[in-house]
Image (cartoon, rainbow, N blue to C red):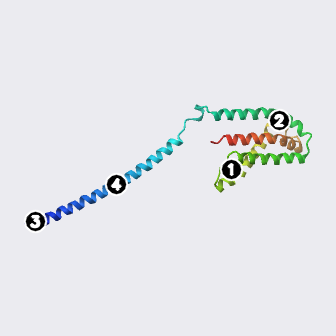
Amino acid sequence: MKRKTVSATKRIIKEEDRIEAKDDEIAKLEQKSFSELKKLETLEKQISKSVVPHPLLKITYKDIVRAAIGSLIGTLGHFAFFYGVEIAEKISPVRATVLYLVSLILVFGFMYYSGFRKVKEVKKLLFVPVRALVVFVTAIVMVTLVLFLFGFVDFTTPFMITYKIVSTLSLLAVLGAATADVLGHD
């Protein structure tokens, strides 16, 4: 009888060990499931933050400020456009070159001080001069194109005259281009 009891006890202990191993396995699975659930919750929060309504469906204070700045630059541009051509006749090529340099410094300073100075990463900070140069060149090209479209310059206009006319309009053009670039980001 003692043998049966020992044998039964061993079986019970074995069964308890097996149940305990199963419990440990279940606890590990529960822990893994809990960990996966936490990851999913984090992912869900990230998705919900990145999903925003279409920007045209909501009018904000920023939209009004952008429109005000754009209209101010557009209005000033109108006057600069006509008087820039007139002023260009009276300036020297050296002064025109200085205007280009001031425009380039202005676009770089404007972009740096209106948001890019907060950038800490060196790779992104090194990108600011490249971005400023792209904005500058784009503004100069657009000024030249507008002058061509309105007939102030054409393919027969001497280079120095075009150079001086574009220089007188470059300050306002790069200011507008930099403003559009900076305001275009959230």
> CB atoms at circles 4 and 1 under 8 Å apart?
no
Please report whichever mark, 3 or 2, sits nearer to the chain's N-terminal start.
3
Residue at horizontal 86 percent and vertical 44 percent from the top: 163
Quadrant hosting residue 153: top right
Residue tagged by mark 4? 29
Q: CA distance from mark 4 to mark 1?
A: 48 Å
Q: Is residue 159 above or below residue 78?
A: below
Residue 4: which numbered mark, if any? 3
Instruction: Find the distance from the CA under tag 3 to the CA under tag 2.
Output: 108 Å
Considering depth in this image, is 142 or 186 the residue closer to the camera?
186
- Amino acid at the residue labelled 4: Leu
- How far apart are the two marked residues, 2 and 4, measured between alpha carbons? 72 Å
Could you say which quadrant of the image residue 155 lies in? Answer: top right
Give the residue at mark 2. Answer: 80
Q: CA distance from mark 3 to mark 1?
A: 83 Å
Callout 1: helix, strand or loop? helix
In the image, which disc is placed on residue 117? Answer: 1
Q: SS of the residue at dot 2? A: helix
Residue drawn where x is 14% and y is 63% of the image: 8
Name the spot of residue 167 as percent of width and height, x first.
Answer: 84, 43
